[in-house]
Amino acid sequence: MPKSRGRKKEKQHVPADAIVASTLPEESPKWLAPIMVAAFLAGLIWIVIFYISSTSYPIPHIGAWNMVVGFGFIGLGFTLATRWR
């Protein structure tokens, strides 16, 4: 027995602007990359100063917590790097 023809489904109309707008990636804000690089460098410089000064600087009274501050800056840089496109 021959197979019957199926009905053709109507295609939904999608405006061309919606397709173009949805395929374009979002762009990062202009301030993101400089702040990200600055945070990485600030953390690196903070830790280097801490080691070169024999754990006396950049903030003398907090001691080894200077490492936490330096890695905090680096962590901020990594957080911003996840938002960069």
Image (cartoon, rainbow, N blue to C red):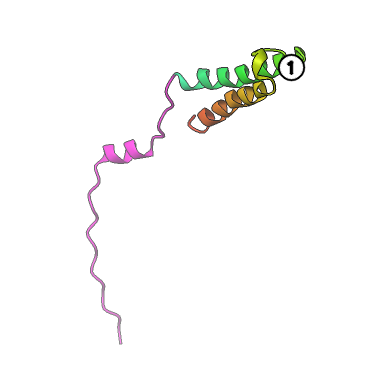
Tell me which corner region of the image, top left, top right, bottom left or bottom right, holds residue 50.
top right
Examine the structure image and report whether residue 38 is included in the region drawn in magenta: no
Rendered position, 83 above or below 64:
below
Tell me which corner region of the image, top left, top right, bottom left or bottom right, holds residue 52.
top right
Direction from residue 69 to residue 10 in the image, left or right: left
At label 1, the amino acid type is: Thr
Residue nearer the viewer, 59 or 82: 59
Find the magenta span and give its range.
1-30
Q: Which residue is mark 1?
A: 55
Rendered position, 28 above or below 58:
below
Residue nearer the viewer, 42 or 9: 42
Direction from residue 19 to residue 84 in the image, left or right: right
Q: Residue furthest bottom?
A: 1
Q: How many labels, in total?
A: 1
Residue at 51% in and 19% down: 35
* Quadrant that contains the N terminus: bottom left
- Expressed as whole percent of the image width and height from the top left, the position of residue 42 reads 61, 17
Dominant SS of magenta comes to loop
Residue at 34% in and 39% down: 22
- Expressed as whole percent of the image width and height from the top left, the position of residue 61 reads 65, 15
Examine the structure image and report whether residue 11 is included in the region drawn in magenta: yes
Q: Residue furthest front?
A: 61
- Expressed as whole percent of the image width and height from the top left, the position of residue 72 reads 59, 26
